[in-house]
Image (tube, rainbow, N blue to C red):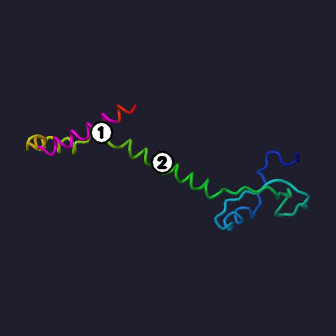
Amino acid sequence: MAMNRIGRPPVAQPNLLERFRNSGGKREVESGRDNTPASPGNLLGHVGDRVEISDRARKLAEMKQVLVAGRRALAEVPDVRQDRIAQARTRLHTGYYHSEDVHKETAARLGSVLRKLEEL
């Protein structure tokens, strides 16, 4: 380590940002060391290691963002939906629930649930 650099800002590679921008969408990070001689733009002789983020990893990251957004949206939905309550009240007052069709549909749904419980 060079003692004369203590307290000074690090020397940046001026073309590193430009190489990242021109990487064609690939996210690459180069680091490491080899025997390349130092030059004014490459004072430490850094080249070597390379990291690429796979398409699958990008898709997983995107899916995670969608999941987080979905959870946030779900958290904003009230536990009690006033529109459904109003609809049920209207149906109750108009006699909708006393029709033969509603009784048959309710019985069919209950029968389905009870059959599934028996299978357990």
77, 39: nearer the viewer: 77
Q: Which mark is residue 94?
A: none
- Secondary element type, mark 1: helix
Q: Is residue 16 above or below residue 96?
A: below
Crowding at label 2, few (<14), some or many (≥20) Cα neighbours within 10 Å? few
Q: Residue type at mark 1?
A: Ser
Question: Is 76 inside the magenta-drawn segment?
Answer: no
Q: Residue type at mark 2?
A: Leu
Lower sequence index among marks 1 and 2: 2
> Looking at the picture, how far across and down is residue 21, in whole percent?
66, 65
Q: Which mark is residue 112?
A: 1
For the residues labelled 1 and 2, the Cα–Cα distance comes to 32 Å
Q: Is residue 6 left or right of residue 95?
A: right
> Looking at the picture, how far across and down is residue 91, in whole percent?
13, 44
Residue occupying image coordinates x 57% and y 52% = 60
- Image-quadrant location for residue 79: top left
40, 35: nearer the viewer: 35
Residue stretch in magenta? 100-115
